[in-house]
Amino acid sequence: MSNAVSEVLLLMGPPGAGKGTQAQRLAEGRGLTKLSTGDLLRDHVRRGTQLGTEAKVLMDQGVLVPDEIIMGMVKSELDKQDPVRVLLDGFPRTTGQADALEELLGEYGAQVDQAIELVVDEDELVRRLVSRAAQEGRSDDNEETIRTRMKVYRDQTAPLLEYYGAKGKLSSIDGVGTLDEVTERLQDALSAEAQ
Ligand code: AMP
């Protein structure tokens, strides 16, 4: 074991809230590894692994990949870390994943330190996702899938806000503004918590 302390942050928010970009910035600023389950899955799809082939069907529909698959991927990433210093992006997405994460982190002597929610209203989200579809050509950024992903977020992931809120670990910040403005709000939320 090294002497450095573990740190686990979660960035939460609906599809299109800007989690990926902000997660990258925040992770770099704090010396954390960004761990995005969406990126890990897209990497499997690109490499044509069996997991990727199975996941692609679900991702293209905008529905969630089963918890067991996600937890297996996360575990193998956390196994590479000592101590665990991660910023989790797009994970956990269900209460099952959140419970499994807590148990897994316990094995590494770590815990979720703070969850931050990026708040963006739904009209703005759809506008951003449609424009991302035009720029990046992600196969799950079409209008029908976007609508499904919003619903999946509301039904399956939004309950996690209460889950972390009840533990006193949630901060919600306004996700509308320039990239720098939002990064600054995130940093303020983190330093406020540390005091
Ligand atoms: P994202 O890039 O985080 O928006 O994820 C894209 C897609 O990958 C989602 O719509 C899901 O199909 C799948 N996915 C990513 N992360 C998870 C997760 N933690 N649990 C279940 N499915 C996930």
Image (cartoon, rainbow, N blue to C red):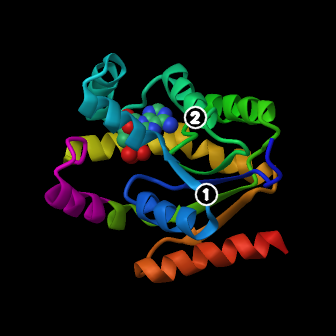
Q: Which residues are magenta?
A: 126-141
- Residue 152 in sight in this render: no
Quadrant for the C terminus in the image: bottom right
The verdict on residue 140 being magenta is yes
For ligand 1, which image quadrant applies?
Answer: top left
Seen in the picture, residue 62 relative to 115 is either above or below; the reply is: above
Q: Is the CB–ligand 1 distance for label 1 below 8 Å?
A: no
Number of numbered markers: 2
Q: Which of pointers 1 and 2 lies earlier in the amino acid sequence?
A: 1
Instruction: Indicate which label's residue lies in the foreground, 1 or 2.
Output: 1
Q: Is the CB–ligand 1 distance for label 2 below 8 Å?
A: yes
The verdict on residue 155 being magenta is no
Identify residue type, mark 2: Thr
- Judge left or right: residue 57 versus residue 73: left
Residue at point 68% right, 34% down?
Answer: 101
The residue under label 2 is 94
Residue at point 61% right, 62% down?
Answer: 31
Residue at point 50% right, 76% down?
Answer: 182
The residue under label 1 is 32
Quadrant of the rendered image containing residue 194: bottom right
Q: In x, y percent, where is residue 141?
A: 23, 48
Q: Residues within 10 Å of mark 1 (few under 14, many from 20)?
A: many
Instruction: Tell me the CA gap for discs 1 and 2.
Output: 23 Å
Main SS type for the magenta part?
A: helix
Identify residue type, mark 1: Leu
Residue at point 32% right, 16% down?
Answer: 50
- Residues tagged 1 and 2 counted as in contact (Cβ below 8 A): no
- Judge left or right: residue 40 versus residue 111: left
SS at mark 2 in the image: loop
Q: In x, y percent, where is residue 66?
A: 47, 22
Seen in the picture, residue 175 relative to 135 is either above or below; the reply is: below
